[in-house]
Amino acid sequence: KAGVTQTPRYLIKTRGQQVTLSCSPISGHRSVSWYQQTPGQGLQFLFEYFSETQRNKGNFPGRFSGRQFSNSRSEMNVSTLELGDSALYLCASSSDYAQETQYFGPGTRLLVL
Amino acid sequence: QKEVEQNSGPLSVPEGAIASLNCTYSDRGSQSFFWYRQYSGKSPELIMSIYSNGDKEDGRFTAQLNKASQYVSLLIRDSQPSDSATYLCAVDTGRRALTFGSGTRLQVQP
């Protein structure tokens, strides 16, 4: 099975712009979670989608949003970018069985100038 | 108090030795526990998952869980230089929202 894929792998944006990141889960996985990783804050949960519905949300401002499509692919959007949004954004997929493992994609590295 | 705590290290062990990594968590509702390995510049890779008290072994890796003490550990036997990485402890309360520790950097000296 192919793993989780994320596009693009690298992005450079300037403050105030917006960005959209894409994630394709492992085939058959319907749950997609997004995480932000920074040197200062570590890995933090952003939100989780299942069947096109956001089920859980982390403690991030409303500038961070996401959606999921009927084929389970997911996108996250960050509007009005700030310098502090520079991070590695990771997508993880899992099946919806209890205690299922989340498998991470390679991530999108975003640099905000 | 952080929800998941790990010693940041670095933990330095000689090649062939046992590396012991520890993690404590605060949420007693945590149901699932994971160890991920992350090489510099890469994404986290699953090493072990554990859900019930006791030990779980997979090759050179053994995960140990003690829910009463809210403690998870990972033992790496016969450590190799290729095991040098940051090891992340993660817990899930069943909401598909992993809470990660800050990671322990392991250095295996040849």
Image (cartoon, coloured by chain):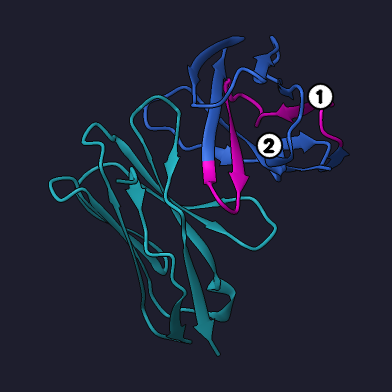
Chain colours: A blue, B cyan
Kindly identify which chain the residue marked by label 2 belongs to: A
Mark 2 Cα shell of 10 Å, populated few (<14), some (14-19), many (≥20): many
x and y, in percent, of residue A54 in the image:
55, 13
Determine whether A58 is above or below B24 in the image: above
Let me know if marks 1 and 2 both belong to one chain. Answer: yes
x and y, in percent, of residue A87 in the image:
69, 44
x and y, in percent, of residue B58 in the image:
39, 60
Which mark, residue A35?
none
Whether residue A1 can be seen here: no
Comes first in the chain, label 1 or label 2? 2
Residue named by callout 1: A18
Asked if disc 1 and disc 2 are in contact, CB closer than 8 Å, the reply is no
Which of these two is toward me, A76 or A82?
A82
The answer to which image quadrant residue A72 occupies is top right
Residue at 55% from the left image edge and 90% from the top image edge: B110
Residue at 35% from the left image edge and 47% from the top image edge: B4
Report the magenta residues as a range: A14-43
Q: Quadrant of the C terminus of chain A?
A: top right
Q: Nearer the viewer, mark 1 or mark 2?
A: 1
Which mark, residue A4?
2
